[in-house]
Image (tube, rainbow, N blue to C red):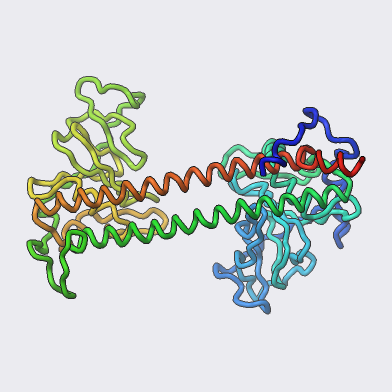
Amino acid sequence: MTDVLTSHDVEEGGVPNGWSTERIADVLTELPNGKVLNQGKSPQCEKEPSPSDEVWGVLKTTAIQPGEFLSVHNKRLPSSREPDESIEVASGDLLLTCAGPRVRCGVPCLVRETRPRLMLSGKMYRFRPDEELISAEFLEGYLLSPGAQELIERMKTGTSDSGLNLTHGRFSELPVPVPPVSEQGRIVEILDEQLSRLDTALESVHTVREKAAQFRRSLLHAAFTGALTGHDVEQGELPEGWRLASLKQHVRSKSGSSKIIKGKQASQPGDGLVQGFSASGPDIWVEEVGYDEAGVAVSAVGARCGKTFLAEPPWTAIANTHALVPDDEINVRFLWHLTNREDWWIKSGTAQPFVKVKDTLERPTLIPSLPEQGRIVEILEDQLSRLDASLAVADAVEERSAALRRSLLHSAFTGRLTRKWREAVNV
């Protein structure tokens, strides 16, 4: 990959000899309705997807991922609604989301294969390139490139990041570099080869993450059933020295404070201020006396409900969090790991989930002796630190792969990627 990425640069702002720059509207072919950009419709649909190829569905915007089409992301069209066959998606179509949150507006993909009876929605465009001028694979690659995405970003309209639009008129003016068709083929060939290598590396990273998640779950299960510290018990038996009890007997619980001191972020507390713990971490100060002993802050409401934070004194929990302070029979770090498991908290609500703190703390829980709690914490944190180190490597690989992908796509559509190839062809 190094060789192709270090080819000579094209002069900034220019294109190589033999290339041209065209409006995207001028390199597209007319669709059956006489337009070059086709927008779908958004009829009221059922919540579930179309169950088979025989039943019409309307595509969701999530069907369009960067460079990937996912036909299963659709909603079933009610039998009472007549389908519009003129906007049925077909292999060879290029699709682009044109409405939605900022990160989901302007996402392109080429439909390489699809099932029948899927309609475009009103939040996406369909278009096809004039194959005598530009190939579909080349145009898809360009639309995914950093340069094109930056231009598309500037074309979006709207006042909120949660709802932006990309209009026909603006998108039609997108400039597209157009090399000779033979060079387009070479660019696509190199991109396919190099990007497939990156994808293979990322698949390995995803496998590592899946195995790490499985190991974490197994490790935590072993920690709180006695297996981590060598107990071998039959089903239904308690490990030696363990008891079944309610945490309510050993933990003080209190709702968080709403007395937030604005502007006191990440600075030394003044008189009467203590550090506040929330779902976003210990980043504000609150005006009330905090706890003088370590404890656990629980995010009680929202998407991160059930997430816990280990808090060192002095501290307090702020609004939408709950403070848990253990007595001298519970190791605070043991409590933290115990309560930070995904499935530990009893929760309720769908649109705005929340943890049922009282019900959870009253539930019978396996509690080992205090010395064994310490041993569990020591073993658990040693294993988790090793696991986190392997995940940090995975993060670095993903970050490096993303940077290489951006660099490769930039090189492809500025002429650097095929500079040597052009020189050899023109000899």
Return the x and y of residue 115 as percentages of the image width and height.
Answer: 69, 72
Q: Residue at x 17, y 45 (%)?
A: 332
Single out the residue that lies furthest toward the bottom: 54
Toward which corner of the image does residue 320 lie, by quadrant?
Answer: top left
Q: Position of residue 391 (x, y in %)?
A: 42, 48
Whether residue 149 is visible: no
Is 330 displayed left or right of 155 in the figure?
left
User: In the drawing, does residue 180 fall left or right of residue 290?
Assistant: right
Q: Nearer the viewer, residue 423 or 390?
A: 423
What residue lies at 35% left-to-right and 59% top-to-bottom? 215
Q: Residue at x 27, y 58 (%)?
A: 220
How many numbered discs sit on the rendered protein?
0
Image quadrant for the C terminus? top right
Would residue 247 be visible to someone looking at this image? yes
Judge by depth and name the residue closer to the eye, 128 or 259.
128
Q: Position of residue 225 (x, y in %)?
A: 20, 63
Q: Quadrant of the N terminus?
A: top right
Q: Is residue 275 left or right of residue 196?
A: left
Q: Position of residue 423 (x, y in %)?
A: 86, 39
Kindly identify the residue that appears in the image at 79 percent across and 32 percent down.
10
Drawn side of residue 409 relative to residue 225, left or right: right
